[in-house]
Image (spheres, helix red, strand yellow):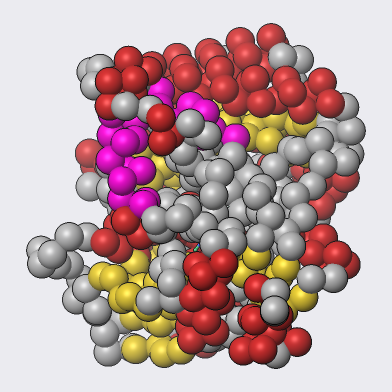
Amino acid sequence: MKTVFEEIIDKLGTKKVSTNPIDLYPYSRDWSPMEHDKDYLPEAVCIPSTTKEVSIILEIAQKWKIPVVAWGGGTGMGGSNLAIRGGIVIATNSMSNIIEIDKDNMTVTVQAGATIQSINEALEPLGLWFPHDPESKPTSTIGAALMCDSNGTFGIKYGSMVNYVLNATVVIPGGEVIRVGQRKAATTSSGYKLLWLMISSEGTLGVMTELTLRIFPLPKKREIMLWVAPSINDATKALYAIQASGLCIESAHINDKHRLNYYTHTYREKTGKTADIPKGYNTLLALSVAGDDDVLEFSKRKISTVLCSNNCIPLENEDIVKGWWDSKHTLSWEKNKWSSSQKKEKFGSADVSVPVGRLQDMYDAFIKYTKAYDLPKVGTAIYNIGPHISPSISFAVFVDDHDKEKVANFFKYVEDMSKTAVLLGGTMSSYIGDGTRLRHLTPFEHGKSLKMMWKIKKLFDPDNILNPGKIFPENIEELSYEDLEKKGRHDER
Ligand SMILES: Cc1cc2nc3c(=O)[nH]c(=O)nc-3n(C[C@H](O)[C@H](O)[C@H](O)COP(=O)(O)OP(=O)(O)OC[C@H]3O[C@@H](n4cnc5c(N)ncnc54)[C@H](O)[C@@H]3O)c2cc1C
């Protein structure tokens, strides 16, 4: 009798399926700070290039009830793509075609394994732009961006994945191919929003193979402005004042001074100094505007007037401004910042979100828990996702993954930060997802509604073969509505 892998090889050919450990290792870790010598080796990797091939894999996997995990660029930071129960990894990097650029309707249709950077490389010569801009864009894929609801630089103007995606092709266990979403119309009130259900489902409901996205005209020019404010609350108030003035900014980031220092490493290397900011001004407010020269000129003047009357001071040193922006947006992280930051110690993040009025409380928790667990600070970066000012936050630390105790401390830090965020009326994850690291805490955040999520999961995936061991705690089957109500903080206001 044939093995499950031989059955898949029969259909896909030997070039698209491997069980050789050398081919499996690249799929054994993501970017989260796991112990240095720990990895999760899948039993096989399949490299399909079409929806049909994904469907074949899921049909055979369902028959054998073997786990299947979709893998994008591997830049996830919460263990969400790890094959913790073995089985098959579907590597999506051979599904990276740009299928259609529809200029009349301002949409692009792509395969799910296309990197975000490659989408823009195809659009830019046509004067078009897909404005989702995570720092990991050279490697992170569009399918995963949806599956983790990732955030990007230009969120205040353009929003997050939910605002970009129009429809998607998804393969569910058993191999059925379904199309979710509203074709190319901007919105729909017909039927359930199954497309939205996919967002941040971390590959637990289906494997996405194609997506249609909204695109925009490529702005002609951009101006970056750095300002400093005394505190996070002052920076937030200043941001509201800009909104109240009617100005349209395209990005707004708030950093503490640790993160400012981290992002301006090119300035540090050039001058041997850290980015010097005036005493008493501990928070960076980084803004950008884009468009025609006259609009930029006006916007800069108006921003200056608004921010000066809101307790902010400009940081005008060009090396600092350029260094910060390069780090955030244009620098290749493979060659520069990230690779060196990953060599000695891993970058780990509590990616919580809280309501704007609780930002300072959450920042105080960051100071408290980094001290309690002795974790060096990378610092705080608040992405603001519009059109409301909705913070998505990276509270980042360095973790020496050669030291088991430090890794254990990191996970305790993430747990304490996550619980604090929920108690402050927020959420444990704003762009990484629950993955393996937070699944024991999902009852705390979601209470009874986790049971409904599990029922939905079982509807798509009755045998739990799709990315098992993520989002839901191990004992989810045994937990009743009552148990979850006791554990949850969901119904508190
Ligand atoms: C240096 C660095 C910078 C980063 N910067 C940002 C940032 O600015 N903003 C941000 O939001 N995040 C950022 N991240 C986090 C990370 O890049 C994002 O979470 C990203 O969306 C992961 O994409 P990926 O293609 O690498 O997916 P992976 O890590 O491979 O997978 C992530 C999840 O998506 C699922 N998945 C992947 N493809 C599919 C598919 N086709 N169908 C179904 N499920 C699928 C996987 O199973 C897994 O659950 C950063 C990470 C790093 C390492």
Highlighted range, magenta: 437-458
The image quadrant that residue 334 belongs to is bottom right
- Relative to 25, does residue 180 appear above or below in the rendering? below
Horizontal side, residue 290 vs residue 2: left or right: left
Q: Residue 22, how many percent across, how many down?
A: 88, 67
Can residue 393 be seen here? The reply is: no
Identity of the residue furthest to the front in this view: 1
The image quadrant that residue 342 belongs to is top right
**Residue shown at the point (47%, 19%) measured from the top left:** 419
| Predominant SS of the magenta segment | helix
Identity of the residue furthest to the left in this view: 189
Which quarter of the rendered picture does the N terminus lie within? bottom right
Horizontal side, residue 67 vs residue 20: left or right: left
Q: Is residue 47 magenta?
A: no
Q: Residue 297, how many percent across, how many down?
A: 40, 58
**Residue shown at the point (17%, 60%) measured from the top left:** 192
Q: Residue 338, how many percent across, how many down?
A: 76, 50
The image quadrant that residue 160 belongs to is bottom left
Which quarter of the rendered picture does the C terminus lie within? top left
Q: Residue 238, how many percent across, how many down?
A: 36, 31
Q: Closer to the camera, 355 or 127?
A: 355
Q: Closer to the camera, 10 or 37?
A: 10
Can residue 90 be seen here? The reply is: yes
- Relative to 44, does residue 104 appear above or below in the rendering? below
**Residue shown at the point (41%, 90%) measured from the top left:** 100
**Residue shown at the point (72%, 59%) measured from the top left:** 42
- Image quarter for ligand 1: bottom right
Horizontal side, residue 489 vs residue 115: left or right: left
